[in-house]
Amino acid sequence: MINDRVLGLVGLILAVFYGLGAQEFQPAFGGGGAIGPSAFPTLLAVLLAISSIYLMVKPDPDESWPPLKTLGELAIILGVLIGFVLILEWVGFILSAGLAVSLLAWRMSAKPKPAAMVGFSSSVFMFALFTYGLDLALPGGTLWGMN
């Protein structure tokens, strides 16, 4: 109960600062439309604030902390995500995302070969979607001379 209220308070503080930061975004030159660059971050801040207030007003009953094994699994997941960010520019999106998704699928009890197939096929699909479908450049990897 107290953990939820503390988390709700931290989330509310984060929502306020995130929302204030979102108001700093300036529209592009000549782009004075109704929805500017701050619309989506502001919406996220409002949703976070509502969720945080709900968590403070109606917390769940106290639960025991998860066993140490679960905390270890969470540490592994955090390590994989940090590793993804650290190698992203160096090896490129396809390889780094493929490794990250493969490792996470493997940690969720998938066999190594299917985990690798899912990881790398999904990273190729996401790369194609962002690069060609949405026209957003993802890093190709400085290791391969593509940046």
Image (cartoon, rainbow, N blue to C red):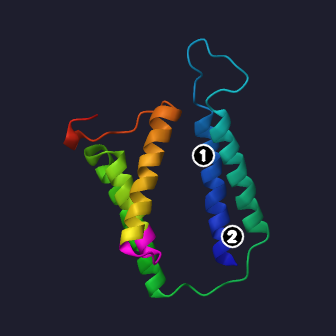
* Location of residue 59 in the rendering, given as x and y in whole percent from the top left corner: 74, 73
Residue 81 seen in render: no
Depicted 39 relative to depicted 11: above or below: above
Q: Position of residue 103 (x, y in %)?
A: 38, 67
Task: Please name the residue shown 70% across and 60% down the image.
Answer: 52
Q: Residues within 10 Å of mark 2 (few under 14, many from 20)?
A: some
Quarter containing the N terminus: bottom right
State left or right for residue 53 relative to residue 143.
Answer: right
Please report contact status of discs 1 and 2: CB closer than 8 Å, yes or no.
Answer: no
Q: Which residues are magenta?
A: 105-112
Residue kind at label 1, given as amino acid type = Phe
Is 109 contained in the magenta span? yes
Tell which of 70 and 51 is nearer to you: 70
Question: Residue visible at 39% across and 56% down?
Answer: 120
Helix or strand or loop: what does disc 1 sit on?
A: helix
Indicate the quadrant where residue 66 lies.
bottom right
Residue 93, x across and y down, in percent: 36, 46
Crowd rating for badge 1 (residues with CA inside 10 Å; few <14, some 14–19, many 20+): few
Residue 112 in the image: above or below residue 28: below
Could you tell me which residue is drawn at 73 percent across and 23 percent down?
A: 34
Quadrant of the image occupied by residue 64:
bottom right
Give the Cα separation between the discs numbered 1 and 2: 19 Å
Q: Which residue is mark 1?
A: 17
- Residue 89 at x, y = what percent? 30, 43
Does any portion of residue 106 appear in the rendered image? Answer: yes
Amino acid type at circle 2 is: Arg
SS of the residue at dot 2? helix
Q: Is residue 10 magenta?
A: no
Badge number at residue 5: 2
For residue 86, side relative to residue 51 (left or right): left
